[in-house]
Image (cartoon, rainbow, N blue to C red):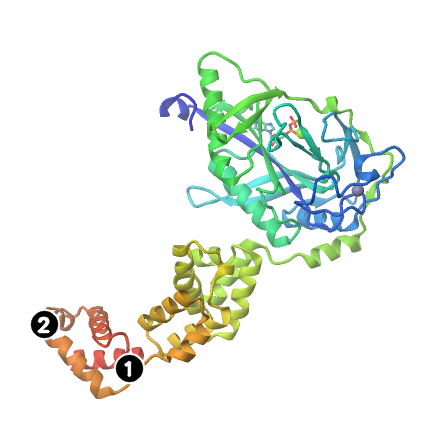
Amino acid sequence: MLAAGISPEIRAKYEPVIGLEVHVQLLTATKAFCGCANKFGAEPNTNICPVCLGLPGALPVLNEKAVEFAAQASLAIHCTINPRSIFARKNYFYPDLPKGYQISQFDKPLAEHGYIDVPTADGSIKRIGITRLHMEEDAGKSLHDGFTDSSTRTYLDLNRCGTPLIEIVSEPDIRTPDEAFEYLTRLREILLFTGVSDCNMEEGSLRCDANVSIRPKGQEKFGTKAEVKNVNSFRYIRAALEYEIERQIELVESGGRVVQETRLWNANEGRTYSMRSKEQAHDYRYFPEPDLPPLVLTPEFLELRLAELPELPEARRARMISEYDLTEQDSRTLTASREFADRFEAAAKTAKNPRRVANVLLSEVGGRLKALGLEQEASPVSMAGIVLAADLLDEGKISSKQLKQLLDMCFEKGEDFLAVYEREKPQQITDTGALETLIDEVIAANPKQLEQYRGGKKTVAGFFVGQVMRASKGQANPALLNELVTKKLDA
Ligand code: ADP
Ligand code: ZN
Ligand code: MG
C-alpha cells in the first residue's frame, strides 16, 4: 500500500499535518430548500422539483428541521453558534449541479470554534479543534458505470440535489493517520448519538476529504497541502493518508515540491492520483444568496436544541462504568450505538446484577453471534432472556456450564432463552450428601493440589470447584458447591 519504500529514518524526519473536511447528510424527511423527499435509493430522478433543479423562477424555502439538526450537531461538538448566519452561492459548473451553484455558507457560517477530544497512542487525550460547521446542499450523482453504454455515456441521477448537508472543518491539528481515524470515529459516534444523520459511508451520508502536508520536524511553518478526496470508507482513511504522506516525503527528498492540488484516492490500487489543481475560494465567486434571508436563531431556539441534546458517548460511557461496574471495553461495546446502549440500560435496571447482564450479553451471546457472523439484531436470545440468564446465574440456580449448554440450544434451534429454559429446567444437584461424595473423590484424586491449598495457596479452591463441577456434568448448585468445597478443604 505504500509509495516506493522510504526508510523509517527518512520518514521520521518529517511530521505530517492533517485537517479533515467532513460532509454529513442530515436525516430530515424532506430536502433543504423544497418539499421533495430526502431518501436514499429511490428510482433515479423521481424526487426532484423546480427548486432543487434550480429552474428559473423557483424559490428556495429553508427546512426548519435541517436547521435544528445542524444546530444540535454544532452544540454536540462544542461549537459556538452564530445567532445570525448567511447563506451564500458557491458557483461552479458540473453536470450533477444543474443550478450552476450550490447554496452553502461562506464568511458567516452557522457555527465556529468547536473541538473533539480523541484518545492518542500514549493513552492521553488530544483536543482537535473544529474551525467551523456550516450548512449547505448536496449535488446530484453522475453514474459512470453499470449501463450497457457506460463506455460512451454518463447518466445523471439528480435525486440527491438539495439534500441538506453540514460540513465540519477541522483545524490542521491532526498529526498522524491514527489520530485522523480516531477523530472521524468520535465525530461519527457523536453525530449518530445526536441522531442528526445515519452516517452511512457506503450510501454517502458521511464523506471525508483529507488535507495533508508534511514539514521537517521542528519547523513551525506548514508545508503545502494536497487534498485527498474519495476516501469513502473508514477502512481506507489510514491507508490513504499514509500513502499520501509517503508520496510527499519522497517527492521532497528527491528535490521536488508538493503542489497544491486535489487528489483522488483509488482503493483498488491503494494510491492517490492527481485530479486537478486546487481551486481557490475566489474561483467560486461566492456571494450572498439573494433568495434567502439571513438565518437568525433566537436564544429560545438554541436553548431548546441544548435541552434536546442526548447524553453523548464519552459521558455516557463514564456514567455506565460507574453505575453498572463495567469494564472500559464493555462500556465501549455497549455504546456501539445509542439503541444498543438504551436496550442494555433498560434491561440492566430490571436485573439483580447489571455487570452480569453485560457479561451474558457481550461474552456469551455476543461471542456466539460473532462466531456465526451475525449482527445483534439477528440474535435468537431476547434481552428478557438475557436478564433471566443473568439472574439465574446470580442466584446460583444454574451454573455457567449449564448457561453455555442452554445458550448452545438457543442458537441451534433459533429459540429464545426464555423458552429453552422453561422446557429444559436443567437439573441441579442440591443434595449436600451427593455433592460431598463427589468432593471427597476429587480431593482424594488430587493430593498435590490439596497440599498446595493447605500450604496457603487459597486460589487452588477454584481448581477443586471446577473439577467437581465437571464430575457433576455441570449440574452442581454453584453456591452450595463453593461452600462445601471450602469447608472440606479447610477441614
Ligand atoms: P482551503 O482554503 O484550501 O480550502 P482551508 O484553510 O479552508 O483551505 O482549510 C481546509 C482544510 O485543510 C482544513 O481542514 C484545514 O485544517 C486543513 N489545512 C489547512 N492548511 C493545511 C496544511 N498546511 N496542511 C494540512 N492541512 C491543512
Ligand atoms: Zn425539490
Ligand atoms: Mg476552505
Please give the name of the residue rendered at 55% of the width and 54% of the height, measured from the top-left corner. 313
| Residue 71 in the image: above or below residue 344 | above
Res 349 visible: yes
**Amino acid type, callout 1:** Leu
Query: 34 or 342, which is in the foreground?
Result: 34
x and y, in percent, of residue 74 in the image: 68, 46
| Residue 421 in the image: above or below residue 108 | below
Q: Which residue in the rendered view is the most extreme toward the top?
A: 255
Q: Is mark 1 within 8 Å of ligand 1?
A: no
x and y, in percent, of residue 316 in the image: 55, 59
Q: Which residue is mark 2?
A: 447
x and y, in percent, of residue 403 in the image: 36, 71
Q: Residues within 10 Å of mark 1 (few under 14, many from 20)?
A: some
Q: Is residue 344 left or right of residue 428?
A: right
Query: 453 or 36, which is in the foreground?
Result: 36
Q: Which residue is mark 1?
A: 480
Displayed-image quarter of ligand 3: top right
Please give the name of the residue rendered at 37% of the width and 80% of the height, measured from the top-left corner. 425
Q: Is residue 458 left or right of residue 29?
A: left
Element carrying mark 2: helix
Q: Is mark 2 within 8 Å of ligand 1?
A: no
Element carrying mark 1: helix
| Residue 222 in the image: above or below residue 37 | above
Q: CA distance from mark 2 to mark 1?
A: 23 Å
Please give the name of the residue rendered at 46% of the width and 21% of the height, measured from the top-left corner. 249
Q: Quadrant of the N terminus?
A: top left
Query: 420 or 2, which is in the foreground?
Result: 420
Rendered image: mark on residue 13:
none
**Amino acid type, callout 2:** Pro
Label total for image: 2
Q: Quadrant of the C terminus?
A: bottom left
